Amino acid sequence: MNDKAKTTRFILVRHAQTKWNQMKLIQGMTDSPLTPEGVQAARSWGAILKEYSPDRMICSPLNRAVDTAVYINETLDLPLSQDVGFLEQSWGRWEGKTLAEIKQESPVILQSMVDLGWEFSPPGGESRISVMKRCTKALQTLHEKWTGQTLIIVAHRGVIACIMYHLLGRAFLPSEPSVLKKGYAQILTCDGAGLKIEALNGVALK
C-alpha cells in the first residue's frame, strides 16, 4: 500500500445557518432548525464538495448537522452515518442565551471561564479540552476504519475550532487572532503519524 492509500482526508464542514444563529443564541447541545437561507446554502455545497471526490459523509447526530448533511447529499449521494464524537460542546445553563445576556448576568464568571483557555467549561457544560479529545479520537477511529478515503465531516463551530486549534498549537485565549474564516471548510489528513492540517480555510463554501 503506497503512502497515499494509507492517508485519510477529512473535510470539516460546519452546519448551515439555523434560526438560533440568526438570533445570536448559543446552541450547544440544544437544536434549532435550519433557516431557508441555510437550506439553500447546504444544497449549494454539494457541487463544491464534489470536486474533492469524497467517499462518504459523517455528521453529528444533532438535527442541524444531520439536515445539512442530507441537503449536501442531494448532490453527492454518499453513504451517510452519524457519530456522537462530533456533537457540539455543551454550554449547559448558558444554552439559549446570547453572549450579551451572559456578560450582563455573569460577567465575572464568564471572564474567569474565558481566561481558562482549553479548560473553559460553561456552568453545567463541557470543557473545550474534553471536546477536543473526543473529536480527535473520533477522527482517528474513522481513519482506521476508512483508511485512504476522503470523508466529509458535518459538525459544529465549537467542534471544528477545538480540532483546528489543537493542531495549530493554540492556547484558545481571546488574545489570539481569529484564524478560522466563516464560510470555509477545513481540510485535514491522517496517517501513521497522526492528524495534520492540509489546508487551513481550504474550501470556500460560496
Image: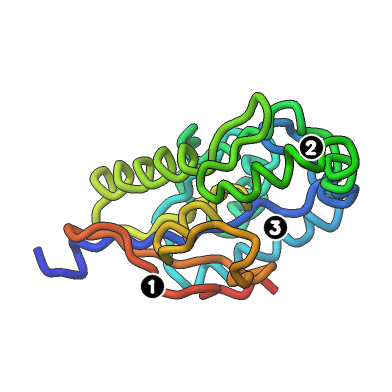
Q: CA distance from mark 1 to mark 2?
A: 31 Å
Report which residue position mark 1 lands on.
198
| Kind of residue sitting beneath label 3 | Ala
Q: Residue at x 55, y 73 (%)?
A: 201
On the question of residue 31 being in view, the answer is yes
- Work out which quarter of the rendered image holds the C terminus and state it: bottom right
Quick one: SS at disc 1?
Answer: strand
Which residue is situated farthest in the left direction here? 1
* Viewer-closest of 19 and 57: 19
Label 2 crowd (10 A; few <14 / some 14-19 / many >=20)? some
Q: Which class describes the residues within 10 Å of circle 1: few (<14), some (14-19), or many (20+)?
A: some
- Check disc 3 and report the residue beneath it: 42
Q: Tell me: residue 11, above or below residue 132.
A: below
Q: Examine the rendered structure and indicate whether residue 167 appears above or below residue 142.
A: below
Q: Nearer the viewer, mark 3 or mark 2?
A: 2
The tag earlier along the polypeptide, 3 or 1, is 3
Mark 3 element type: helix
Q: Considering depth in this image, is 153 or 92 the residue closer to the camera?
A: 92
Q: Is residue 99 left or right of residue 171?
A: right
Identify which amino acid the numbered label 2 is placed on: Ser
